[in-house]
Image (tube, rainbow, N blue to C red):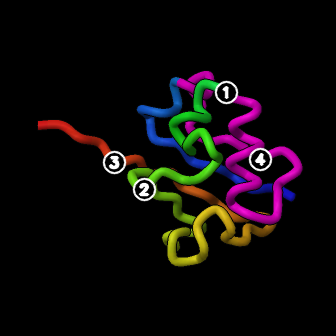
Amino acid sequence: MSVTLQLPTVLAKLADGQRTLEARGGGATLGDVVSEISTRYPGLAPRLRDADGKPYPFVTFYVNDDDARIQGGFSATVRDGDEIIVVPAIAGG
């Protein structure tokens, strides 16, 4: 199964500069994909999920342009060919 995860530039530096990552072996849920990517890029892991493996409220995941929070968060189903976009909240002034 092929699922891609799109990172913003601010997070790409934690994934060897890559903005597009392909999940190896896919996974049945968004949480599976995030877990697999986090294993490969341990520096990225704490930016995508908390220490308990749960999503942060300030990081939004979109599965094919649909907010994953509405689809069950990390329980959201992913399928072959899906695209996940990560959008962290950025503060500044």
Give the distance between the C-alpha atoms of the residues marked 1 and 2, in whole angstroms.
20 Å
Rendered view: 70 above or below 47: below
Residue type, mark 1 in image: Pro
Closer to the chain start, of discs 1 and 2, is 1
Q: Are marks 3 and 2 in contact (CB under 8 Å)?
A: no
User: Which residue position is annotated with label 1?
Assistant: 42
Name the amino acid type tagged 3.
Answer: Ala
Is 68 displayed left or right of 5 in the figure? left
**Which numbered circle lies on residue 23?**
4
Q: Which span is picked out in magenta?
A: 14-41
> Which residue is at a point 77% across and 43% down the rendered structure image?
36
Residue wearing tag 3: 89
Distance in Å between CA atoms under marks 3 and 1? 20 Å
- Dot placed on the residue nearer the N-terminal end, 3 or 4: 4
Asked if marks 3 and 1 touch (Cβ < 8 Å), the reply is no
Name the secondary structure under disc 2.
Answer: loop
Query: Which residue lies under the disc numbered 2?
Result: 57
Q: CA distance from mark 3 to mark 2?
A: 9 Å
The type of residue carrying mark 2 is: Pro
- Element at label 3: loop
Neighbourhood count class around disc 3 (C-alpha, 10 Å): few under 14, some 14–19, many 20 upward: few
Q: Mark 3 against mark 4, which lies toward the viewer?
A: 3
Answer yes or no: do the residues labelled 4 and 1 have beta carbons within 8 Å? no
Quarter of the view holding residue 49 = top right
Question: Which quarter of the image is occupied by the N terminus?
Answer: bottom right
Q: Nearer the viewer, residue 86 or 20?
A: 86
Q: How many marks on residues? A: 4
As drawn, the residue found furthest toward the left would be 93
Task: Locate the C terminus and report the quarter of the image it occupies.
Answer: top left
Q: Amino acid at mark 4?
A: Ala
64 vs 81, left or right, is left
Decide whether residue 18 is among the magenta residues.
yes
